[in-house]
Image (cartoon, rainbow, N blue to C red):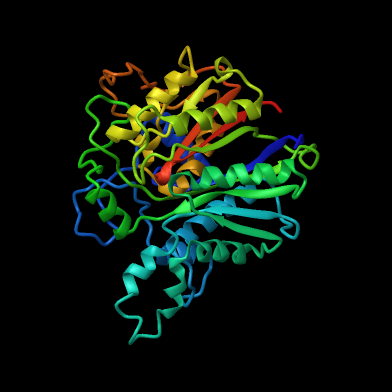
Amino acid sequence: MSRSVAVTGMGIFSAIGKDLEENHSSLIHGKHGLSTPEILETIHQKLPIGEIKATNTALAKSLNLDENHAFTRAALLGTIALKEALENAKIKDFTNIGFVNGTSVGGMDMTERFYREYENDKTNRRFIQAQHPGFTTEQIAGYFEINNYVTTISTACSSAANAIMMGARLIKSGRLDRVIVGGTDCLSRFTLNGFNSLMIYSEDFPKPFDAERKGLNLGEAAAYLVLESSELAENKEILAYVSGYGNANDAFHQTASSENGEGAYLAMQKALKTAKLNPHQIDYINAHGTATQNNDLSESRALIRTFKEMPAFSSTKSFTGHTLAAAGGIEAVFSLLAIKHQQIYPNLNFESVINETKLEPVTELKSAKIDHVLSNSFGFGGNCTSLIFSKNG
């Protein structure tokens, strides 16, 4: 398990941009992508969401799919983001490549739309199997004819981060030399209704790590990295390295983090150990930062336990909304952009510190020397994952 894991390409599609360039522009100009629903058919017309303003028809057309395709919205977003990642890495041969995809919503948007019609209308029965997250992965893999190693990870909001970790481990162990990793999730009525019923959804824009935070806003997105062994990437441009990763579970509650952030703390400790880094060597933390009462306090306590002196940190969910399974993927891309441009992206809407912890995120675009970035992704069921990206191997 000694081989270095290089990132040679990345691609992204989110509410703040259809590609890397647009996403970076939004980050540096403080332009969020939250608005009221236009594409998603929902009764909650006043709840802010990070919606990509493109219909499924338009997305399918951009991929030259015929009108009888069975692509879910998550698969459409994922295929577009993955296409950019492959182009970014200059990869054209997919015969010996792995694909680890994270998703939790999967094709739920399709099954909730058509399930009342399945008995009498055969036209949309092709979407019945879309409920399974693996169906979305297979659609994306099929588009690029990737069939060497294809698998799905569905661990709620840490799915894409776990996909990145698994891809890195596959390369380190010598199982594969090149793996596409990341995740995709779309908005659905089920998730919007669900988070709203949990009473953790904000009717205003989210305020991560703020004393007056009222809850999260959901978003949709897809993002992927191309990982290659350092030997295979020897003559290529290397964006960064996946130097550390860790996964832990605080085994506390189905939907809440433990009060002292045990799972988050253990995940960060494991990531630091894998990367062979001391806490003071982390230059920036892209925090999970959902803007819920429970998560932000729990994560803050875990950060204080880990770092004697807090590095600069922020939650970019204030730009995109919480994109569930895709969050670890898009925030990995944002972490890599931070390394590439030596920038720390702001935590929007912050006004006052949480009394119990007094931590203050970065609130304006900041230039800084960045060699190591820690990215946190914590999922329901206590599934906590931390990744570390490093400028040099």
- Establish if 52 lies above or below 59: above
Task: Using the rendered image of the protein, determine whether residue 340 is visible from the camera's viewpoint.
Answer: no
Outermost residue, top side:
309
Q: Position of residue 41 (x, y in %)?
A: 26, 62
Quarter location, residue 213:
top left
Quarter location, residue 228:
top right
Q: Position of residue 51 (x, y in %)?
A: 34, 50
Quadrant of the image for the C terminus? top right
Count of all numbered marks drawn on residues in the image: 0
In the image, is 1 to the left or to the right of 192?
right
In the image, is 254 to the left or to the right of 329?
left
- Establish if 46 lies above or below 123: above
Q: Position of residue 211 (x, y in %)?
A: 25, 24
In the image, is 59 to the left or to the right of 190?
right
Q: Residue at x 43, y 74 (%)?
A: 128
Task: Using the rendered image of the protein, determine whether residue 89 is visible from the camera's viewpoint.
Answer: yes
Q: Along the line of sight, which residue is nearer the eye, 215 or 233?
A: 215
Q: Residue at x 49, y 20 (%)?
A: 306
In the image, is 225 to the left or to the right of 15?
right
Quarter location, residue 391:
top right
Q: Along the line of sight, which residue is nearer the eye, 87 or 293?
A: 293
Q: Residue at x 41, y 36 (%)?
A: 26
Outermost residue, front side:
251
Quadrant of the image for the N terminus? top right
Q: Residue at x 60, y 31 (%)?
A: 389
Q: Position of residue 86 (x, y in %)?
A: 64, 51
- Establish if 33 lies above or below 184: above
